[in-house]
């Protein structure tokens, strides 16, 4: 948000986490910029009017929802015509392997990973470690879901975790970012 605001955008941050929203408020106050803060759940109807937003910056957060088709449909609904969706998401590899920083990498989950349908201990581990309950999604759901919602994909790139986050990053990108337009 600080970057978008510095570029002259009127910004709204939307999140379910009180802690995240408080962090956004703290940074905005410290850096002296205005930001609209909206608490909400992206698994529900978004609290924005049809065609009311110019840009949606959707960082890697689909991992916290089971149904990403709903997310893409809602993004399409609230964007203006020619509005831009900038989205990042996990490609699933972080869920496939147990990356403890050593080789060999061990396959631990089938993809797409759904903790509600996986081994009970995996769900418990996520909850006990305050990771949030996380899902992986197929590229059909992520990219195909954007296309099915009506978006036109205009760019895509892959990226890796930052250094110090396991060794998988040395062998394959774990993330994808897309740019799509509502026409």
Image (cartoon, rainbow, N blue to C red):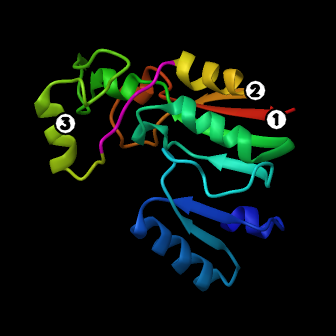
Residue 177 coordinates in the image, percent (x, y): 63, 33
Residue at 78% from the left image edge and 68% from the top image edge: 10
Give SS at disc 3: helix
The residue tagged with tag 1: helix, strand or loop?
A: strand
- Verify CB contact (< 8 Å) between mark 1 and mark 2: yes
The residue at which mark 3 appears reads as 123
Q: Residues within 10 Å of mark 3 (few under 14, many from 20)?
A: some
Q: Describe residue 93's horizontal placement relative to residue 46 as left or right.
A: left
Evaluate if marks 2 and 3 touch, with contact meaning CB atoms under 8 Å apart: no
C-alpha separation, residue under disc 3 versus residue under disc 1: 36 Å
| Residue numbers of the magenta segment | 133-138
The image quarter containing residue 165 is top left
Q: Residue at x 79, y 55 (%)?
A: 52
Q: How many marks?
A: 3
Which comes sooner in the sequence, label 1 or label 2?
Answer: 2
Residue 25: x and y, percent? 55, 77
Above or below: residue 25 compared with residue 149: below
Residue matched to label 1: 182
Q: Which residue is mark 2?
A: 150
Which-is-in-front pick, marks 2 and 3? Answer: 2
**58 or 42, nearer to the observer:** 42
Q: Earlier in the sequence, mark 2 or mark 3?
A: 3
Position of 180 with respect to 66 (left or right) is right
In which quadrant will I find the C terminus? top right
Give the spatial CA distance, label 1 vs label 2: 7 Å
For disc 2, the neighbor class at 10 Å (few under 14, some 14 to 19, many from 20) is some
């Amino acid at each position: 948000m600080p970057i978008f605001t510095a570029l002259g955008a009127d910004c709204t941050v939307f999140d379910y986490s009180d802690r995240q929203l408080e962090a956004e408020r703290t940074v905005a106050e410290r850096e002296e910029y205005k930001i609209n803060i909206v608490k909400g759940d992206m698994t529900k109807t978004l609290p924005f009017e049809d065609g009311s937003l110019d840009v949606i910056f959707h960082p890697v957060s689909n991992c916290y929802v089971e149904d990403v088709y709903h997310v893409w449909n809602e993004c399409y609904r609230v964007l203006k015509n020619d509005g831009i969706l900038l989205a990042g998401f996990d490609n699933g590899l972080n869920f496939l392997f147990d990356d403890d920083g050593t080789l060999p990498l061990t396959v631990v989950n089938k993809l797409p990973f759904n903790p509600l349908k996986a081994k009970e201990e995996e769900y418990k581990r996520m909850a006990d470690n305050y990771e949030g309950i996380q899902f992986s999604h197929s590229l059909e759901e992520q990219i195909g879901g954007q296309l099915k919602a009506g978006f036109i994909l205009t760019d895509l790139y892959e990226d890796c975790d930052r250094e110090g986050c396991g060794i998988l990053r040395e062998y394959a990108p774990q993330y994808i970012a897309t740019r799509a337009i509502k026409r």
